[in-house]
Amino acid sequence: MSLPAAVYCPRNPQSSDYYRCVEDYFETFLGIYDEHFSQQYGFWRPYVGQVIYRYLDCGDPHKGFARVKCKDCGHEYLRAFSCKRRHFCPSCHQKRVVEFGGWLCMDVLKKIPHRHFIFSIPKILRRYFLYDRKLLADLSRCAWESLKLFLREAVPQNDPIPGAVIAVQTFGDFLGFNPHCHILVTDGCFYGKRGMFRVAPPLELKKLEAIFRHRVFRMLLSRGKITKQMIAMLSTWKHSGFHVFCGNRISPKDDTSMENLACYIIRASFSQERMQYLDQEGKVVYTSKDGRTNKSFPALEWLAAMCSHIPNRGEQMVKYYGYYSNVSRGKRQKEGLDDAVPCILEPQGDEKVFRRNWARLIQKIYEVDPLVCPKCQDVMRVVSSIEDPSVIRAILEQLGLWLARSRPPPKIHDPPIRENAICDLRLQTHNDDFYGDPEYSWDQYI
């Protein structure tokens, strides 16, 4: 006998530890941020407050919903509207992750070998990117220019062009601000008008790291963030803090690994499964990826760390370079040398496709089709969207769902008692020689 189909149950975000933590503390957090957290996490960005308010309304039927109904048996349910915010809302961001992974593999990446690179910077430089988020785009450019230089030298063809998709992440395992670049790059270069591809030999990571370090120093110096004296001092460190990781070659036939990696590079900044909210103590306990380490945060400190990873409105955290750039893809499409590819991140399609999109993403994430009727197994459809407050109330009262979620009001929280949070920027010098290669000249890259 075949097993019965799984039944889709609309999510209830208000019951999660994460939602309860935000709900209990966000008003206190907004009131004391400038005094207690601005030095450590940067100035308050008004857009962050909008994201928090939108998240608190996400999945709440009192703010509007769509009616999903089966035309055969008449069974229906209500699907609350989502906030569609990045990083702060776990559910909406996960839908974005799945959509991005599928779109990138289908419409951008070509069926050629790729590699995964990670470019990271030392702790002492991270504060500049925290206080000036425009530097994150410059960091992406530094990583691309370093990789492009090596790949073009490795392929002996006329005007070789590599392609790269670079996602900038700002978080570490415990939400510390750690800007670094995840890169999906072609393992070689395209050349010729017909897009011929030649695989590149393995790169020398130490030299690649040295070039990346030089470009970051030069970029920060040109922006007035650091001085030549600081660069000279950092150059004496035995361990510079810069690091370049290179993964194994990804085969063109390994679609699953490529899509998983595409999802990974824009993943959310935290995991709800590893978070525990202790409401009576006003703390959040977070577990590391390997499950061996726990770290306890005051709830307000947790929210401050979370907000530092929210992108600004319209800020692009994913960049496309070389053969995968929007300009290159647009030109190939116009000349008929490439399949039809969208030039923007959002998926292309008609209005009906957009309406069905939420169901496809939920099915892919939870392996449950929300448009299958649990009673007769027929296909359901969205029959209406309810946004008028009076109609919303009338329907929810009829169904016994109006203000059904009752929680005691949050207790009054005292602001955290803490000294001025100033980053520990004590510098350590080493007598060891800076990494150098006798055959390596900086002049050709200046």
Image (tube, grey):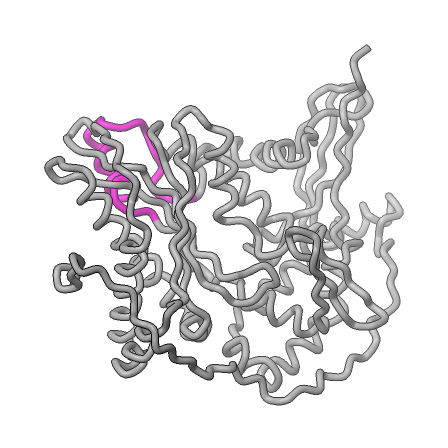
Q: Which residues are magenta?
A: 320-345
Q: Is residue 215 visible?
A: no
Q: Tell which residue pokes out farthest to the bottom in this image.
A: 419
Query: Which residue corresponds to the image point at 73% horizontal and 59% vertical from the top-left?
Result: 19
Q: Is residue 74 above or below residue 176?
A: above
Q: Nearer the viewer, residue 398 or 153?
A: 153
Quarter where residue 431 is shown: bottom left
Q: Tell which residue pokes out farthest to the top in this image.
A: 1
Q: Position of residue 295 (x, y in %)?
A: 70, 66
- On screen, residue 130 versus residue 443, left or right, reads right
- On screen, residue 41 versus residue 290, left or right, reads left
Q: Is residue 339 magenta?
A: yes
Query: Which residue corresponds to the image point at 76% horizontal and 59% vertical from the top-left?
Result: 276
Q: Is residue 353 above or below residue 277?
A: above
Q: Position of residue 227 (x, y in %)?
A: 28, 81
Q: Position of residue 37 (x, y in %)?
A: 59, 80
State which quarter of the image contains the C terminus. Answer: bottom left
Q: Total label count? A: 0
- On screen, residue 310 versus residue 154, left or right, reads right
Query: Which residue corresponds to the image point at 42% horizontal and 42% vertical from the top-left?
Result: 247
- On screen, residue 325 versus residue 290, left or right, reads left
Q: Is residue 322 above or below residue 135?
A: above
Q: Is residue 12 magenta?
A: no
Query: Which residue corresponds to the image point at 29% horizontal and 77% vertical from the top-left?
Result: 231
Q: Nearer the viewer, residue 152 or 302?
A: 152
Q: Is residue 433 visible?
A: yes
